[in-house]
Image: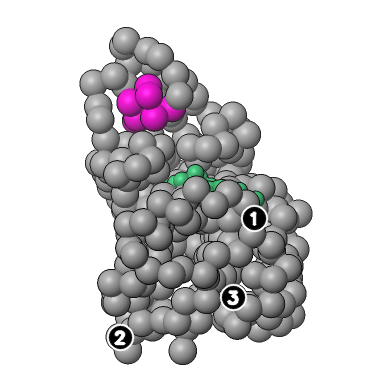
Amino acid sequence: MLNLGIIGCGNIGRIIIKAIYKGKINCKFAGVFDVNKDGHNLLSGETKKRIKFFDDFDKFIKADTNLILEAASQQAVKNYATEILKHDKNLMIMSVGALADKNLLAKIKRTARERNLKIYIPSGAVVGIDGLKAAMLGGIESVTLTTRKNPKSLGIIADKEKILFNGDANEAVVKFPKNINVAATLSLAGIGFKKTKVKIIADPNVRENIHEICIKGNFGEILTVAKNLPSPDNPKTSYLAPLAAIACLKKLTSEIEIGI
Ligand SMILES: NC(=O)c1ccc[n+]([C@@H]2O[C@H](COP(=O)([O-])OP(=O)(O)OC[C@H]3O[C@@H](n4cnc5c(N)ncnc54)[C@H](O)[C@@H]3O)[C@@H](O)[C@H]2O)c1
C-alpha cells in the first residue's frame, strides 16, 4: 500500500492533499511537513479535516511512509532528498531544477540504486516526455523548449513581447530558477542540460503558461504545445503540474499502466 508523506503545503501540496481526501489516489497519508504553517491552516479551513502537520523534518522522516513527495523548493530537494532515501523511502520530486546540480543528481541516484528505491519525476506542466523517452532510443538531434508567460508570472513588467532568455537549459536553470522545472524535466528525460535549448519569452498578450517543445531525431519530429492555465492560488505554477503529480501517484497504484 502506498503510504505517502508530502514536503510543502503550498499550492501543489494542497491540491494533492485535497485529491487524497477526495479518494482520487489509493493511498494512506501520513502528513505534510512545511517550515510555514499558513498553507496547512488554509487547507484545514477548506477541507475541515485534521491533517497531520510536521514542522520538524526529523519527526516527519520517522513517520510511517514509503514515498515522500517533495513539492516545496529546490532548497528542500538539496536539504532532504538524500536523507529521505537513506531512510529507505522512495522519492517524488517536483522542484526538478535542483537536479541541474550534477553532484546532487549522482548522489541521489547512487543512494536509490544501493537501497533499491525509486526516484519519480512527474512530467509536470509539459506534454511530450513520453515521446521524448521513446525517441531517445533511436537517436535525437535536437530538443528545444519555448516557454511563453505573462510578464506577471515571471515577476517582471513588460508591455510588449520580450525574449528574456535564449540559451541552454544549464544556464536557464541558474537564471530562472523558479520557472525552469519544465526545462529540467526535459533535459533529464532527453539529451541533458547542455544540449537542450531553451527560450523564455515574456508576452503580455497571453494569460496561459505556454510550453512548446520541438524534438527532432531519427524517428522524425515531435511538436507539442501545452497552454497551461495558472493554478488557482499561485500564478507561477501551472495547474497541469499538480495534476501530473496526482496522475503519477495514481500510476503507482493502478493495475494497468497506460503510456510510458
Ligand atoms: N515539475 C513541475 O513541472 C513544476 C511545476 C510547477 C512548480 N514546480 C515546483 O514545485 C515546487 C512547489 O510549487 P508550489 O506552487 O506548491 O509552491 P508554493 O510556493 O505554493 O509552496 C511551497 C511550499 O513549500 C514550503 N517550503 C519551501 N521550502 C521548504 C523547505 N526547505 N522545507 C520545508 N518546506 C518548504 C513553503 O513554505 C511553501 O508552503 C516549487 O519548487 C516549484 O518550482 C514544479
SS label for mark 1: helix
Q: How much space separates mark 3 and mark 1, taking CA atoms?
A: 13 Å
Residue at numbered disc 1? 77
- Residue 218 in view: no
Of residues 209 and 145, the one drawn nearer to the viewer in this rendering: 209
Q: Is residue 165 magenta?
A: no
**Circle 1: residue type:** Val
149 w.r.t. 89: above or below? above
Say whether disc 2 or disc 3 marks the residue closer to the N-terminus.
Answer: 3
Say whether disc 3 or disc 1 marks the residue closer to the N-terminus.
Answer: 1
* Label pair 2/3, CB-CB below 8 angstroms: no
Q: Is residue 149 magenta?
A: yes
Left or right of 183 in this view: 251 = left
Instruction: Residue at 69% x, 71% y: name it.
Output: 59
Instruction: Residue at 26% x, 41% y: name it.
Output: 229
Question: Which circle, 2 or 3, is nearer the viewer?
Answer: 3
Q: Residue 81: horizontal and vertical position, in percent?
A: 67, 63
SS label for mark 2: loop
Q: Which residues are magenta?
A: 148-154
Q: How much space separates mark 2 and mark 3, taking CA atoms?
A: 21 Å
SS label for mark 3: strand
Instruction: Residue at 32% x, 89% y: name it.
Output: 255
Residue at numbered disc 3? 90
Crowd rating for badge 3 (residues with CA inside 10 Å; few <14, some 14–19, many 20+): many
Q: Which mark is residue 256?
A: 2
Q: How much space separates mark 2 and mark 1, taking CA atoms?
A: 30 Å
